[in-house]
């Protein structure tokens, strides 16, 4: 089905907590040193353990480098444009809230970066990609929250702009290469007897997250998705590490 997702429907580094442990020496000769250290004001005491390095959000240049370009895709693909929209979704199950915005790419609490939209033919096959970044451990928290939603929501109903859509969710295999990856298919009933089934992958590398959506005819969708999602994942990881 030749359905423009963004127009028709919309208009997924863990920061490890480091334990800083002071080294303790043994023997009688160390006791005096310990006593002297204890007598020093806190400002004078030092620790040999390194401080935890804060997680730095991706730069705009990194996010741009992390998104596919038409030259990265097989022949036949072309760049497309879309109108920027911000759609508010209401879902019938609170646990499913992270899933409905996957259609439009709105990721809460993230700083938006570059996007890529591509199509083959007369929109017979479409790609929508977005890279965002988070402060601190926000990216890891987001992936965890999305993973919980996938486990809890095999189906739900979402409402946007007065229109209700029934959605079913099915996990699929994610390509390897990123620190974390979640892949799934959304089956959407946009009208009685009318469904579309985009495949998505949401991956994390450091403080960055990439959402990649592919919509195509059912006969070739999964095979094409596997190859295209791998391309997108590899470029995202490379860009995020640049």
Image (cartoon, grey):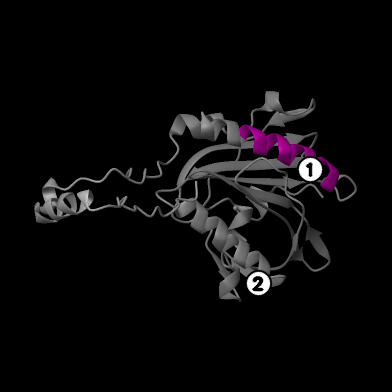
Tell whether 200 sits left or right of 115: right
The residue lying at 47 percent from left, 29 percent from top is 61
Q: Sequence-wise, which precedes: disc 1 or disc 2? A: 2
What secondary structure predominates along the stretch shown in magenta? Answer: helix
Pinpoint residue 164: horizontal percent, then vertical percent. Answer: 66, 69
Pinpoint residue 141: horizontal percent, then vertical percent. Answer: 50, 58
Q: Nearer the viewer, residue 190 or 33?
A: 33
Q: Residues within 10 Å of mark 2 (few under 14, many from 20)?
A: some
Q: Nearer the viewer, residue 187 or 120?
A: 187
Give the residue at mark 2: 152
Q: Nearer the viewer, residue 75 or 205?
A: 205
Pinpoint residue 200: horizontal percent, then vertical percent. Answer: 70, 51
Give the residue at mark 1: 226
Q: Indicate whether residue 225 is drawn in magenta.
A: yes
Task: Give the image quarter of residue 82.
Answer: top right
Pinpoint residue 240: horizontal percent, then vertical percent. Answer: 53, 35
| SS at circle 1 | helix
Q: Indicate whether residue 221 is drawn in magenta.
A: no
The residue lying at 71 percent from left, 34 percent from top is 231
Residue 67 seen in render = no
Tell me which segment is drawn in magenta.
222-235
């Amino acid at each position: 089905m030749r359905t423009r997702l963004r127009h028709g429907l919309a208009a997924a580094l863990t920061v490890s907590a480091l334990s800083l442990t002071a080294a303790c020496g043994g023997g009688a000769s160390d006791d005096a040193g310990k006593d002297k250290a204890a007598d020093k004001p806190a400002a004078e005491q030092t620790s040999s353990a390194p401080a935890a390095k804060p997680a730095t959000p991706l730069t705009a240049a990194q996010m741009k480098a992390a998104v596919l370009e038409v030259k990265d895709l097989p022949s036949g693909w072309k760049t497309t444009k879309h109108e920027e929209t911000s759609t508010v979704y209401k879902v019938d199950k609170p646990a499913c809230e992270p899933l409905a915005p996957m259609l439009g790419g709105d990721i809460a609490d993230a700083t938006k970066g570059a996007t890529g939209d591509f199509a083959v033919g007369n929109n017979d096959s479409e790609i929508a990609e977005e890279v965002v970044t988070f402060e601190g451990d926000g990216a890891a928290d987001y992936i965890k929250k999305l993973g919980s939603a996938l486990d809890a929501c095999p189906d739900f109903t979402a409402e946007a702009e007065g229109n209700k859509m029934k959605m079913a969710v099915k996990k699929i295999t994610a390509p390897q290469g990123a620190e974390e990856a979640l892949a799934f298919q959304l089956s959407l009933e946009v009208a009685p007897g009318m469904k579309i089934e985009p495949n998505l992958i949401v991956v994390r590398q450091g403080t960055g997250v990439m959402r990649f959506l592919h919509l195509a005819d059912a006969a070739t969708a999964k095979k094409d998705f596997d190859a295209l999602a791998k391309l997108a994942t590899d470029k995202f990881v490379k860009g995020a590490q640049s």
